[in-house]
Image (tube, rainbow, N blue to C red):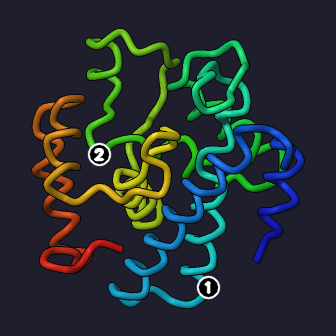
Amino acid sequence: MIDYMTIIKKYISEEEQLYDIYMSHVERVADRAVVIAQRIGLSRLEQEFIYDAGMLHDIGVVEVYAPDIGCNGGLPYIQHLIVGKRILDEEGMPHHGNVALRHCSPKFTMDNIKRRKIPLPEGNYLPQNIYEIIISYADLFYTKNPCYQGKCRCLEEVLPMVDRYEKGSSDEVYEYALEFGELFLPEL
């Protein structure tokens, strides 16, 4: 088990506006991801990795510009994926870095990125394993927007939201909901 709090506090001071927003978001994502991991029978060690990676998946926001959540860096928000990968690689956690890089969307292909002119370098941004899939799925249900902090979106809100970004994504998200035993359950 890693000391994710030391890493978070290294990059985000508790006095910053971002700290509470970040912690509220990642705690909810990590908690939901672990519940899913338990439900599908992943080992205790895998659950620990998922929790730790969930707590660190958005660490790259420290270098982006999103003043509404306390991010005053200079990069476009979407680049938190590559910044998070770099930070976690530098911290000696390349597997956690892969989660940071690939937690965005089930249909985030390079073709779609280029077509939509998203400012990301060439790379593979699709979740590659069950850990990355679970965290990217759990992340869809929670926002860092201070107006909705702590609120969990329901699946009926998530499905049209992901289709707005990429047609057909809702089908894949619905399949994950089935696979993860999340249909017809009360919201977490």
For the point 26% across and 12% down, the residue is 115
Residue marked by disc 1: 45
- Return the mark for residue 106: 2
Vertical side of 10 occupied by 131: above or below: below
Q: Are marks 2 and 1 in contact (CB under 8 Å)?
A: no
For the point 16% across and 48% down, the residue is 159
- Within 10 Å of the Cα at label 1, are there few (<14), some (14-19), or many (20+) other Cα atoms? few
- Cα distance between the residues tagged 2 and 1: 25 Å
The mark tally for this picture is 2
Q: 68 or 104, which lies in front? A: 68
Q: Position of residue 146 (x, y in %)?
A: 52, 40
For the point 31% across and 31% down, the residue is 109
Classify the position of the N terminus by image quarter: bottom right
Q: Position of residue 135 (x, y in %)?
A: 45, 60
Left or right of residue 111, residue 22 in this image: right
- Return the mark for residue 16: none
- Within 10 Å of the Cα at label 2, are there few (<14), some (14-19), or many (20+) other Cα atoms? many
Q: Position of residue 166 (x, y in %)?
A: 20, 31
At label 1, the amino acid type is Leu
Q: 152 or 5, which lies in front? A: 152
For the point 33% across and 34% down, the residue is 108
Query: Quick one: SS at disc 2?
Result: loop
Vertical side of 87 occupied by 31: above or below: below
Q: Residue furthest front?
A: 147
Left or right of residue 97, residue 173 in this image: left
Classify the position of the C terminus by image quarter: bottom left
At label 2, the amino acid type is Pro
Query: Quick one: SS at disc 1?
Result: helix
Q: Position of residue 85 (x, y in %)?
A: 66, 40
